[in-house]
Amino acid sequence: MVKRNLTSTSLDTLVSLAKRRGFVFQSSEIYGGLSSVWDYGPVGVELKRNVKDTWWKSMVRERDDVVGIDASILMHPDVWAASGHLESFSDPLVECQDCHKRFRQDQVEADACPNCEGQFGEPRQFNLMFKTFMGPVEDETSTVYMRPETAQAMFVNFENVQTTSRKKIPFGIAQIGKSFRNEITPGNFTFRTREFEQMEMEFFCEPGSDEEWHQYWMNFSLNWFKDHGIRGEKLMLRVHEADELPHYSKASADVEYEFPWGWGELETISNRTDYDLKAHAKKSGKDLSYFDDQKKQRYVPFVVEPAMGADRSALAFLADAYDEEGEGKQQRTVLRFHPDIAPFHIAILPLSRNEKLTPTARRVYDILRPHFNTQYDDSQSIGRRYRRQDEIGTPLCVTVDFETVEDDDAVTIRNRDSMDQVRVPVENLESAIRDQLNKMRVDSQG
Ligand code: GAP
């Protein structure tokens, strides 16, 4: 396991590193920013893409029993009537009668307004779905909603996917995509925002097998984070109390991570029963039952759903990877990402920007680029470039020096965590890097 010095860091430190190194910027910053909306920069986009690709690989490509879809954000308004979102997808809102600030009732501790100590009015339910209009007429009949979860597309496409993929139950449908919620109190950087990405999977199973599958997917979810580098002691599975279950759920549990401000949800694994398929069958008039041709039985499948946030997970990977070590001039900040999550695998660093070194360094770059996500950097001193790569969590740096060019056609590989350096002939470089990355994959499991 990778030795870390820090158990945690502050949110301010993460936000400032994220900005400085191109992970995350505030949206529309030159106009003063849009509150709680964030843009991923050149490094952050790689991090988030790796989180999504790694999930997709584990969830879809490496399994026989899950297929993917990519559905539209806008759906028929009846979807949200049937699913219960129009009626129940709301939070209790209280408004201060003096300063008119609004808060989620369950997030204010006292009876008085935290902004001005004023009195709150009566609480009311606030629906979290964003509305817009479809077509040129803006009225009730043209109202559509920005989906607040990706899940409903899997339910309404159940029959299309089942018949075209010829999957037999139990099987799942996965999707990664944007969702929107008009949160009353977003915050904590990218943790709670109004526009975010979800990675969800609806697993259709025979009624009666649902509790076993629920257990299976809870274990799978917790292990997925550990296998990709999050420390086990920073993760927990929290089972929902009856009064906090979402309207569609018979049982739910959250995978939580200990963020700098405390424990927060990364993923909810719910037993959605046959709630959604039955609701859509009723509203649409379409039979969404399944015929089990081995058992010669027809039933409406139950659904177990692991539902994860891509942005929250990326934030947890960032927070968990953050470490500092050394003192004085030797001090460095290092992000100890698992190699599959790290924004870049390798940085090619010629010792200096020198015309003798550049052709060889570019040749090495061209050799590695097809196989690894590789950066090339020849600006500033080599020490500063190592620090920069440490701060974005690049597992391996490859240095090209004068000996490489004049003598041995070998390069130095420097390991991010141990800072050990080994010299490797260019002809063996690809396999040497694969070996080191594989070792780092094993070492960084949580
Ligand atoms: N289909 C079920 C569902 O959407 P959820 O617990 O409401 O369940 C699943 O959402 C995941 O989506 C959460 O665990 C979280 O990671 C992410 N998520 C939800 N609301 C979010 C928000 N406002 N900002 C960022 N991520 C959010």
Image (tube, rainbow, N blue to C red):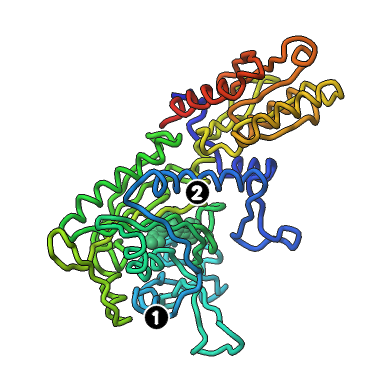
Q: Residue at x 24, y 51 (%)?
A: 213
Helix, strand or loop for disc 1: helix
| Residue 273 in which image quadrant | bottom left
Q: Is residue 93 left or right of residue 358?
A: left
| Residue at the spot of label 2 | 52
Q: Is residue 153 visible?
A: yes
Q: Residue at x 59, y 59 (%)?
A: 36
Q: Nearer the viewer, residue 417 or 97?
A: 417
Q: Residue at x 74, y 15 (%)?
A: 404
Q: Is residue 386 left or right of residue 353?
A: left
Q: Where on the image, by quarter, is ligand 1?
A: bottom left
Q: Is residue 34 above or below residue 403?
A: below
Quadrant of the drawing holding the N terminus: top left
Helix, strand or loop for disc 2: helix
Q: Is residue 237 above or below residue 369?
A: below
Quadrant of the drawing holding the C terminus: top left
The answer to which of marks 2 and 1 sits earlier in the sequence is 2
Q: Is residue 33 left or right of residue 319?
A: right
| Residue 38 in which image quadrant | bottom right
The answer to whether the beta carbon of the residue marked 1 is less than 8 Å from any atom of ligand 1 is no
Q: Is residue 184 visible?
A: no
Q: Amino acid at mark 2?
A: Lys
Q: Amino acid at mark 1?
A: Asp
* Residue 368: image location, x then y, percent: 64, 30
| Residue at the spot of label 1 | 78
For label 2, count other residues whose C-alpha is less than 10 Å away and answer few (under 14), some (14-19) or many (20+): many
* Residue 163: image location, x then y, percent: 32, 65
* Residue 84: image location, x then y, percent: 34, 75
Q: Nearer the viewer, residue 16 or 220?
A: 220
